[in-house]
Image (cartoon, rainbow, N blue to C red):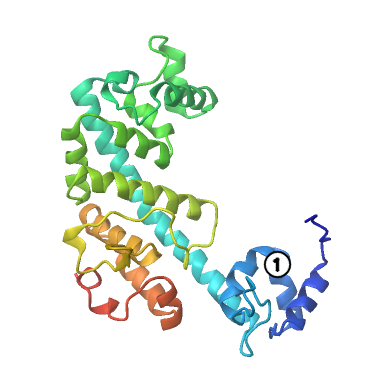
Amino acid sequence: MKFTKKPSSIEQQLQLLIQRGMDVGDHATAMKWLETVGYYRLSAYWLPFERPPENGNARSKIFESDATLSAVTDLYVFDRRLRVLVLEAIERVEVHVRSRWTYHMAHAHGAHAHLDHRLFSGFLNHAEQLVRLARAVDKSEETFILYHKGKYTDPYSPPLWSATELMTLGELSKWFQATKDNKIKSQVGRDLGLPTKEIVEGTLQVLALTRNICAHHGRLWNRRTVKRLPKIKRFKKDLVLVTEGQQEENDNRLYNILVVLLHMMDKQATDSTWRDRLRNLIEAQSDSDRSKMGFPTDWRTRPVWNP
């Protein structure tokens, strides 16, 4: 099928919402939202307000009788605030992993441990990652990188504690997963409050995906992650499990990610107000919204929310 849609004006977009049954409220305010956020971006937040589709269609594109643009924008603002909080916690985790992995690797294997392919499994395309790192070094305007390039020529790569500062969380998780020294991986896991290296690896992968959603301002609140968190027995009373085939797996909605972040924040930042700020934000939402995020009805009584 050939794409034939033409761009529509703000006024046309507003009229389309009205025709589909949405109460848009004050027209000037509604048009301001469409101008500053955009019809397409907001459409992800009014999907829950549409009537269920009929005859196997993907969407009805007709709104429920009580759908309002105000409710849609409230949900949008909630998601924005939620992303800020989640990104704050992931930043803490990312910096902590970066610091501890770098520290243990450098002390065990030297300042340029990342250059030694023998320290990493085949999971990591070591040569490719070094090329990526070299490109990052070339492009970097960071003071510590410029200092290294201005003073040292052998090796070209800066030491591990500088090099890791140029890695994304996704890249760092790959380096961590490929590390052959299981003693180091276990130590980092203990620092994070995670019991095994496999759990650390799986958790970092999920957090890297979540971080990318937050960093690119994507919809977070009711999203299902492509990859599930690993099962963590010590968090069993807090996590929500679902049956997939013949096995129980962690639910892949946001609630479980928040639970793991809460536990990790408790381990790293005992004086943080993050739990209170998160809980206040979640409490302000409806039961229906919390359910779509994977929250169980008894979430308030679970241990992680009541330290």
Name the spot of residue 11 as percent of width and height, x first.
82, 73
Name the spot of residue 20 as percent of width and height, x first.
73, 81
Query: The N terminus lies in which quarter of the figure?
Result: bottom right
Name the spot of residue 90 as percent of width and height, x first.
37, 52
Q: Is residue 263 above or below residue 104?
A: below
Secondary element type, mark 1? helix
Residue 31 relative to residue 52: left or right: right
Query: The C terminus lies in which quarter of the figure?
Result: bottom left
Residue lying at the far top in this picture: please name it.
Answer: 154
Residue for point 68% across, 70% down: 33
Q: Quadrant of residue 179?
A: top left
Residue for point 72% across, 71% down: 32
Q: Is residue 67 above or below residue 72?
A: below
Q: Is residue 38 visible?
A: no
Tell me the amino acid under the disc marked 1.
Answer: Tyr
Q: Is residue 213 above or below residue 179?
A: below
Name the spot of residue 197 as percent of width and height, x first.
22, 42
Q: Quadrant of residue 62?
A: bottom right
Residue where numbered disc 1 is placed: 39
Decide: few, some or many residues near mark 1? Use Cα within 10 Å; few <14, some 14-19, many ≥20: some
- In front of the other: 143 or 51: 51
Residue 269 relative to residue 135: left or right: left
